[in-house]
Image (cartoon, rainbow, N blue to C red):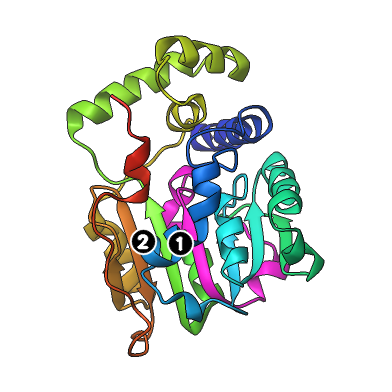
């Protein structure tokens, strides 16, 4: 019962965020990110030749405001963008109308409201060449179950990509837990205002994303890799060297020449770090 209440708060938090705080670092208000979204996807996060993407069917599993949907469309993919937040889906449609109108005109984007712990039959029947989930499953309340729901949707030769919160030092986790507990009772608008005052040099969107949702699970690399192995993904690649979890998984080895050398630092997200 408590976990379900926390899940509901987390869903409401993200719905508020996409309606009321859509702009931020590495969002579709950021000209640098808009320019580089497709390169980041192919070269850094997935480490795949851009020539692989045109025509591929991709599930953007937790699309948020559509920032990665944009990159996938620019790489030539057909994209089903799903999210549990109606405001996220509306933001994605609006942003793609602004930034990728030719993809919409060509019918390369679909959107669907989906709870990844209880996907609808219409989704369960489909198969995708790439399942892409960036910073989403650790907010579901049952990351292993959500991952198990996604795995059967992948084609035999497809790729699954995950970004999840990694395990941070205990002192850091304790500070985060304290801040989240103190902020939890506040209405979302008051929480937004409080974060702007508490962290005036930080991006409010990203700070709200980190501290407002009640569910923010984190994982060791080995745990996630064991789950993927159990689900039939023996070919695993840590695409970025980080305490966070950046993993590309597949059931079969990539064809020769498809994988690209791993990116070297500075990674794309490091440009946004503030003291």
Q: Residues within 10 Å of mark 1 (few under 14, many from 20)?
A: some
Report the residue at 53% width, 52% height from top: 35
Question: In this rendering, is residue 257 above or below 132?
Answer: below
- The answer to whether residue 140 of the structure is visible from this angle is no
- The answer to whether residue 39 of the structure is visible from this angle is yes
State left or right for residue 177 relative to residue 28.
left
Q: Position of residue 255 (x, y in %)?
A: 37, 89
Q: Which residue carries the number 1 mark?
A: 39
Q: Nearer the viewer, residue 118 or 207?
A: 207
- Of the residues tagged 2 and 1, which is closer to the observer? 1
Q: Nearer the viewer, residue 132 or 101?
A: 101
State left or right for residue 233 relative to residue 203.
left
Q: Which residue carries the number 2 mark?
A: 44
Q: Position of residue 18 (x, y in %)?
A: 64, 35
Q: Are marks 2 and 1 in contact (CB under 8 Å)?
A: yes
Question: In this rendering, is residue 118 above or below 16?
Answer: below
Q: Secondary structure at mark 1?
A: helix
Q: Position of residue 72 (x, y in %)?
A: 57, 64
Report the residue at 24% width, 52% height from top: 265
Task: Quarter of the image for the C terminus: give it.
Answer: top left
Q: Nearer the viewer, residue 51 or 229?
A: 51
Question: In this rendering, is residue 140 above or below 47?
Answer: above
- Region in magenta: 118-146
Report the residue at 29% width, 46% height from top: 166
State left or right for residue 250 relative to residue 126.
left
Spatial CA span between label 2 and label 1:
7 Å
Question: In this rendering, is residue 179 above or below 222?
Answer: above
Task: Quarter of the image for the N terminus: give it.
Answer: top right
Q: How many marks?
A: 2
């Amino acid at each position: 019962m408590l976990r379900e209440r926390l899940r509901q708060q987390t869903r409401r938090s993200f719905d508020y965020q996409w309606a009321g705080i859509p702009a931020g670092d590495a969002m579709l208000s950021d000209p640098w990110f808009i320019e580089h979204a497709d390169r980041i996807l192919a070269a850094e996060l997935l480490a795949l030749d851009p020539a692989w993407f045109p025509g591929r069917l991709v599930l953007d599993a937790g699309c948020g405001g559509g920032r990665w949907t944009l990159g996938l469309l620019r790489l030539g993919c057909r994209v089903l963008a799903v999210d549990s937040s109606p405001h996220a889906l509306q933001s994605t449609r609006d942003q793609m109308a602004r930034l990728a109108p030719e993809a919409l005109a060509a019918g390369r984007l679909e959107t669907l409201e989906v709870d990844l712990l209880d996907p609808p039959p219409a989704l369960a029947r489909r198969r995708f060449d790439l399942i892409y989930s960036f910073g989403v499953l650790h907010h579901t309340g049952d990351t292993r179950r959500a991952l198990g729901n996604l795995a059967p949707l992948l084609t035999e030769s497809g790729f699954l990509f995950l970004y999840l919160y990694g395990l941070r030092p205990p002192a850091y986790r304790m500070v985060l837990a304290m801040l989240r507990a103190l902020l939890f009772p506040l209405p979302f608008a008051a929480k937004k205002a409080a974060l702007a005052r508490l962290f005036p040099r930080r991006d409010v969107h990203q700070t709200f994303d980190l501290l407002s949702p009640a569910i923010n699970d984190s994982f060791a690399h080995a745990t996630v890799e064991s789950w993927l192995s159990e689900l039939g993904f023996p070919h695993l690649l840590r695409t970025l060297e980080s305490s966070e979890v950046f993993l590309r998984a597949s059931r079969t080895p990539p064809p020769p020449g498809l994988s690209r050398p791993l990116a070297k630092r500075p990674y794309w997200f490091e440009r946004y770090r503030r003291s």
